[in-house]
Image (cartoon, grey):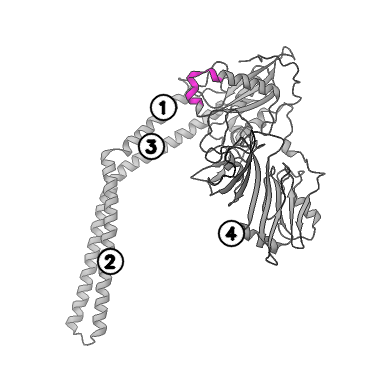
């Protein structure tokens, strides 16, 4: 499984530390290895159709124990390929759950048999007939009882009218009215009992099917949970220290406590496991996407991506122990000596030009500077939250700050009712030959639960996100565009630019949805709002420096 690079690369220095897998620029050796893997994949005709729908691959540069100069690479794919886990050229899985005689396949067949029994019962002719009869009977009962109840009410009102309009009713006439009331109530009760009996008869026969289906579903759930538990116990993950931990132990320390489906089957854990088992020293890694983008997520063919957070972060925190790993670039306080530029200020509010790479508000890393911390120091008498809205850490541009709680509330209200106008400018990584063309993108967005902070498009879980745009100019490989967001979802412009149903053209430097560059080329250049005190319209502009 160890491959030597075909092209000699003695001029490329070895990495000093292992790649930080969640935020990286691929090392040149990884790029060389990835190109060889891509060439290999392109020749595999039997996988062509499956790979067209998309898959993540990974490479790991390793050093052999025999010689410090013995450099090679390992390759892996995430999940399975062509219904198998074992393929020449690629490292094997940590545990092959697809082996024919293994416990997973045997138990999976049993669970599939239960599924078949459930499906058969749910499609039994008598079961479907009873369901339809019950629905029809319930509906008709509601209609007839409602109609009968209305007639009762009308008859009662008529009797009351007779009693009020004719005070000389004889005892016999009054008795007749009482008998009429009693008869009508008794008829209603008889009708109610008849429908109740008919519905109960149907439900009794139907419950025999439902009880059996419910018992099968309960058995399926119990067996599935036990199978998952046993499966996760087979994934015994090594680290550079030689320590072993199974997935259950690793994820026990996380918020959700249990491993998500597919944990341990991504490319990088496979690569590291194989390296540790064969005494190969990991030097650098990279993962790239091959094929079309998934419907909900954003992936571009051939682009490099960081490891996923939900499935891989807890695993890699264990597996990378014992290796010297690059620091997280996002934990570096790159703006500790940067002055914040004030674009507009009066006694009630401030508009600043946030530099790219600075947080709007404090994050998990206390030592990382943020606009909020800076302005708290600069305006010690300010009250309230100050930050009215936010920009992504990587985004530059105009940020509105309130000096008092009351001003903050007023400005936030304008954001909530969408009366504040915003304009962003961006460079897209590709050419869209429609200068002057404008349009609207409406793609609902929500967080990707297994890969935060990445967002995803989802018709089911996403919140409405609307962006208007206008293409400003194009060059050979870039498109300059103006964005006018009508909603303020996280990563809205980045997702709408990159998604296949949006512009299908990621913003330059967007390592989450495109590919990394020296910065994210997205800048908030214009704000228009109603002043919270004197109510005049305020327009602030700061053009991008790109």
- Magenta-colored segment: predominant secondary structure: helix
> Could you tell me how far apart the alpha carbons at marks 3 and 4 are, in whole angstroms?
50 Å
Q: In the rendered image, which residue does mark 1 sit on?
A: 109
Q: Magenta span has 397?
A: no
Sequence-wise, the earlier of marks 1 and 2 is 1
Residue 221: percent from the left, percent from the top?
A: 44, 37
> Could you tell me how far apart the alpha carbons at marks 1 and 4 are, in whole angstroms?
54 Å
Q: In the rendered image, which residue does mark 2 sit on?
A: 149
Which residue is drawn at the image coordinates 32% and 35% (left, top)? Answer: 120
Which of label 1 and label 4 is nearer to you? Answer: 4
Q: Is residue 172 visible?
A: yes
Residue 136: percent from the left, percent from the top?
A: 27, 51
Sequence-wise, the earlier of marks 3 and 4 is 3
479 or 382, nearer to the observer:
479
- Residue 50's place in the image compared with 211, above or below, is above
Q: In the rendered image, which residue does mark 4 sit on?
A: 417
Q: Which residues are magenta?
A: 41-51
Sequence-wise, the earlier of marks 3 and 2 is 2
Residue 228: percent from the left, percent from the top?
A: 51, 32
Q: Magenta span has 43?
A: yes
Q: Are marks 1 and 2 in contact (CB under 8 Å)?
A: no
């Amino acid at each position: 499984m160890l491959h030597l690079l075909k092209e000699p690369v003695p001029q490329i220095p070895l990495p000093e530390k292992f790649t930080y897998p969640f935020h990286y620029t691929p090392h040149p050796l990884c790029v060389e290895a990835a190109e060889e893997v891509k060439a290999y994949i392109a020749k595999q005709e039997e996988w062509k159709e499956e790979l067209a729908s998309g898959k993540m691959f990974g490479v790991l540069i390793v050093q052999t124990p025999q010689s410090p100069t013995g450099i090679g690479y390992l390759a892996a794919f995430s999940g399975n390929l062509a219904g198998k886990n074992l393929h020449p050229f690629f490292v094997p899985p940590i545990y092959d759950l697809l082996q024919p005689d293994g416990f997973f396949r045997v138990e999976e067949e049993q669970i599939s048999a239960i599924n078949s029994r459930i499906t058969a019962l749910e499609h039994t002719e008598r079961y479907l007939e009873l369901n339809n009869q019950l629905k029809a009977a319930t509906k008709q009962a509601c209609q007839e009882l409602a109609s009968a109840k209305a007639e009762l009410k009308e008859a009662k009102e008529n009797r009351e009218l007779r009693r009020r309009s004719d005070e000389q009713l004889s005892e016999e006439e009054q008795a007749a009215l009482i008998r009429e009331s009693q008869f009508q109530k008794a008829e209603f009760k008889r009708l109610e009992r008849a429908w109740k009996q008919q519905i109960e008869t149907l439900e009794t026969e139907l419950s025999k099917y439902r009880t059996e289906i419910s018992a099968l579903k309960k058995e399926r759930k119990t067996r599935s949970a036990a199978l998952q538990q046993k499966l996760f116990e087979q994934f015994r993950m090594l680290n550079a220290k030689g320590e072993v931990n199974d997935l259950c132990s690793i994820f026990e320390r996380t918020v959700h406590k249990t491993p998500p489906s597919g944990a341990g089957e991504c490319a990088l854990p496979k690569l590291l496991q194989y390296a540790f088992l064969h005494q190969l020293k990991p030097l650098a890694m990279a993962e790239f996407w091959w094929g079309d983008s998934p419907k909900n997520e954003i992936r571009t063919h051939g682009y490099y991506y960081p490891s996923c957070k939900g499935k891989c972060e807890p695993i890699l925190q264990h597996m990378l122990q014992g290796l010297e790993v690059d620091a997280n670039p996002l934990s570096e306080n790159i703006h500790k000596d940067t002055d914040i530029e004030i674009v507009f200020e009066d006694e009630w509010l401030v508009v600043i030009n946030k530099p790219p790479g600075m947080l709007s508000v404090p994050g998990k890393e206390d030592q990382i500077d943020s606009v909020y911390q800076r302005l708290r120091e600069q305006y010690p008498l300010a009250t309230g939250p100050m930050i009215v809205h936010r920009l992504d850490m990587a985004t530059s541009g105009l940020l509105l700050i309130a000096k008092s709680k009351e001003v903050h509330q007023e400005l936030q209200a304008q954001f909530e009712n969408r009366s504040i106008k915003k304009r962003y400018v961006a460079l897209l990584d590709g050419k869209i030959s429609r200068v002057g063309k404008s349009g609207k993108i409406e793609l609902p967005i929500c967080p990707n639960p297994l890969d935060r902070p990445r967002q995803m498009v989802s018709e089911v879980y996403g919140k409405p996100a609307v962006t208007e745009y206008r293409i400003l100019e194009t060059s050979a490989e870039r498109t300059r565009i103006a964005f006018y967001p009508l909603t303020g979802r996280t990563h809205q412009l980045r997702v709408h630019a990159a998604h296949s149903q949006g512009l299908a053209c990621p913003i330059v430097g967007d390592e989450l949805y495109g590919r990394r560059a020296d910065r994210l080329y997205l800048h908030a250049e214009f704000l228009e709002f109603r002043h919270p005190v004197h109510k005049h319209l305020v327009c602030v502009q700061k053009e991008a420096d790109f």
